[in-house]
Amino acid sequence: MLTVVIPTFNEEHNIIPLTERICESLKGKEFEILFVDDSTDATTEVLEGLSRNNPRVRFIHRHNQRGLATAVVEGFRAARGEVLAVMDADLQHPPEVLPRLLDSIETGNDLVIASRFVPGGKDGGLTPLRRVISLTARLIGRLALKKVRPINDPLSGFFMFKKEVIEDVKLSPLGWKILLEVLVRGNYQHPAEVPYAFERRRGNHSKMSLTEQVNYLRHLVRLVSSSPEDLRFWKFCLVGTTGVGVNMFFFMLFTRLFSLDVILSALLATSLAIFGNFLLNDLYTWAQQKEDHLLGRVIKFYLCSGAGMVINVAVLSALHCYLRIPAILANGAGIIASTAWNYYANNRWTWGSATSRLANENPDSQ
């Protein structure tokens, strides 16, 4: 059976048309609609009457509680279905998409997202300002979390998954983006996205606020902190940033205090910065992973860093000299490429055997 979980807060005018459209869309299917209600208006009374007249409708009314994500999690716990769907109550998520999501589940996918950003999808229900906010939030989420990067619409509030995806998983969402929690913590193998057109909101104004945006950022920090692989990458970036400061300090010291040649000073400063980065990464980023001898790790790190510098210069040259991209932008692209290389190479080679061992011991962390 499918359970459609719908969190509600003051949606009295949308409940009945939404229910009618869901029932029409899922005609012939075994399903229930579970509203989790935090309302302070007449929504609760509407739900009471609806549940009496429609056996497919159930609702939970929470007293003195607020929060879309926590409401959805409570709905997950109370759901009777083996497949769970989540959607909003404001009619921006068209119920007519539910059969397509269910078809995708029945063909073997265990997590299916209704997406605005795959071919055929549209985000016409957003104002220009909300589109900018949504784009920024998606970019930050995909940059911060590895498991989110393959997903085009990781902030969708409209999705469906098999209940086994969250079995024995502790969900502790913060704010309004429950899908991020499922993507990072859930146990799934075959995610998919189905296009849909995000519709304009009907009825009350949007419940998006500055507080919810701050909660989104706090949620990202919590997810990164609880994901060893993501946390390791950001530790590596932090160490690399400190390396820039170390490099500049020694470069100025050699050129101004000791009056050394600029090229020689740059080489010495870079070598010291690389060694400083190695020590910090060895003690901080990959603190538990010490299977190779110290000298072996140092040599590997220097080789990876040297290759990273070659990549940086190659990308800079290609973009600036051949494609005429401004030098500052081309150099930035080179830095990104070399950072990605350095992390991947060091994670797989310098500290690679221990990384693989920990991954095998803790498969859920990767």
Image (cartoon, rainbow, N blue to C red):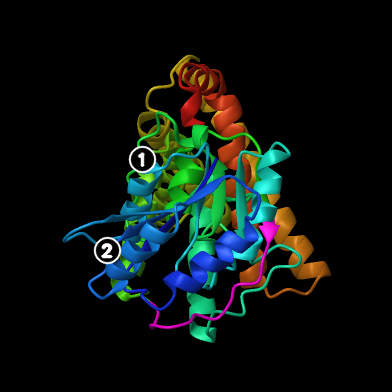
Q: Is residue 149 left or right of residue 254?
A: right
Q: Nearer the viewer, residue 194 or 81?
A: 81
In the rendered image, the vertical position of residue 26 relative to residue 239, given as above or below: below
The first of marks 2 and 1 along the sequence is: 2
Give, as a three-letter code, the residue at label 1.
Arg
Q: Position of residue 140 (x, y in %)?
A: 49, 61
Residue 27 in the magenta stretch? The answer is no
Quadrant in the picture for residue 200: bottom right
Q: Kindly identify which numbered label has been placed on residue 214.
A: none
Instruction: Decide which of 66, 325 is in the foreground and name it.
Output: 66
Q: Amino acid at mark 2?
A: Asp
Which residue is disc 2 drawn over?
A: 38
Q: Which residues are magenta?
A: 194-206
Q: Residue at x 61, y 38 (%)?
A: 110
Marks 2 and 1 sit apart, C-alpha to C-alpha, by: 17 Å
- Residue 204 on the magenta segment: yes
Image x and y of residue 4, in percent: 49, 52
Name the secondary structure under disc 2: loop
Q: Residues within 10 Å of mark 1 (few under 14, many from 20)?
A: few
Query: Horizontally, is 168 left or right of 315 in the view?
Result: left
For label 1, the residue is 77
**Is 249 located above or below residue 285 in the figure?**
below
Q: Are marks 2 and 1 in contact (CB under 8 Å)?
A: no
**Residue 7 occupies quadrant:** bottom left
